[in-house]
Amino acid sequence: MSDSEEYEYEYDEDASDGAGGSEDDQDMEDNFEYTDEEEEADDAEVALENAYYNAKGLRDSSDSTPSEILEAFQEVVELETKQQAEEQDNDDDDGDKSTMKIWSYKARKQLVKYYLRIGNSQEMMKQYSLLLDIIASGAVSPNAIEKGINGMLERVSSLYQGSDSNSRSTTVTDKVALDPKVVARNVYDATLQIFHPKIGTSPNERLWFKTNLKYGQLLYEMNETTKLQLVLRDLKHYQQQESNDAGEGSSSSTTTSSTNLMEIYALQIQLYSKQKDNKKLRDVFQKAMSVRGGIPHPRTLALIQELGGKMHMASREYSEATSTFFQAFKSYDEAGDP
């Protein structure tokens, strides 16, 4: 038997109680059952993998049309759905009945990115909603979820910021206008809803908090201060609960809470600086500088110190401004910024 062949067998434990000899050997042989179920499962997995990478090959080919690429990725979803349905028909156990698995997740993610690339926001949001449904089914690992979601958020953010020129292409026959602001808001709102710690279908406090921070930064750049203030309200409410929990928890919990608080303060300081509200800016800056135990990113600390220095300059507090700017330069240097 070659190394590549694997057999699943079942045997009757009572068979070993026989008297031995050729009759015993025959009994043992009768009690073994060889199946090809594992090999069939491997073949199904290989078929899905091949279908997915064939679709990616079409995507990367200059000779492929958008419809060919979209159909290829959709076929991956349909193939896995069909395979899962067949497995459930043959399975008497009350196990996981989800027909949405990892290859469907990968294919949906590619569909979202491709629709975004060709400028069809309506279909992009439809596929993104289906992608979130797969995540809610529990079929995807937490690491894969965080990596995939962060990548998607960066794409919609860069779409608004204008750094991804390919995203503005309109090669699709469907004439669907792509408004970067609307796309960004829709994607962020849908993401925050599913990962909400209390009411989300796939609660994830860490990812919800990070997504809210990114959303707040994007809203700041969009100059949507009213919605930004709502995001800040949610973040502060969450952080207050986290701080209360950390008071009775470990030192690592306290560190995380303090770090998150610094991220919130950085966002608040940017808002008050833009609004030229020096009273609120000074209050938040002083709170930020009194935080202990956190490990904020050097760029976050540098931003707080830079805007604090500008605040001191506006108030003609030149000595304090010099000291604060110096600390900002050190933090930017530590962050690797020129």
Image (cartoon, helix red, strand yellow):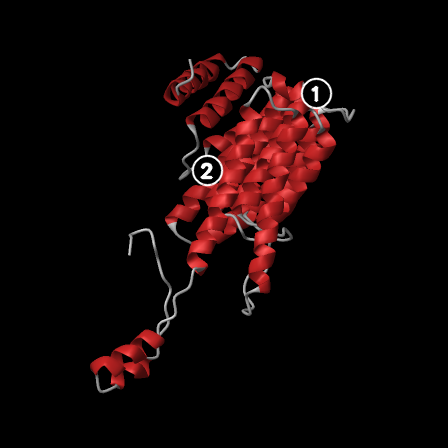
Q: Which residue is mark 1?
A: 171
Task: Please say if 217 is above or below 19.
Answer: above
Callout 1 crowding tier (Cα within 10 Å): few <14, some 14–19, many ≥20: few
Q: Is residue 209 left or right of residue 12?
A: right
What element does badge 2 sit on? helix
Task: Residue 242: give x, y in percent of width and height.
Answer: 52, 48
Task: Report helix, strand or loop for mark 1.
Answer: loop
Q: Which of the two residues, 284 or 10, is positioned nearer the viewer here?
A: 10
Q: Residue furthest right?
A: 175
Look at 31% across and 84% down and name the residue there: 14
Is the C terminus in the top left, top right, bottom left or bottom right quadrant?
top left
Residue 103's spot in the image, x, y percent?
Answer: 53, 44
**To which residue does mark 2 refer?**
259
- In this view, the residue farthest toward the front is 22
Apparent side of residue 103 relative to residue 161 in the rendered image (left or right):
left
Front position in the image: 125 or 96: 96
Q: Amino acid at mark 2?
A: Thr
Q: x and y percent of residue 108 in the render?
A: 60, 39
Amino acid at pointer 1: Thr
Which residue appears at 45% of the width and 60% of the height?
A: 37
On the question of residue 283 being in view, the answer is no
Total numbered circles? 2
Asked whether the beta carbons under mark 2 and mark 1 sit within 8 Å of each other, the answer is no
Gap in angstroms between the C-alphas marked 2 and 1: 44 Å
Say if residue 316 shows up in the picture. Answer: yes
Foreground residue among 257 and 167: 167
Please say if 28 is above or below 157: below
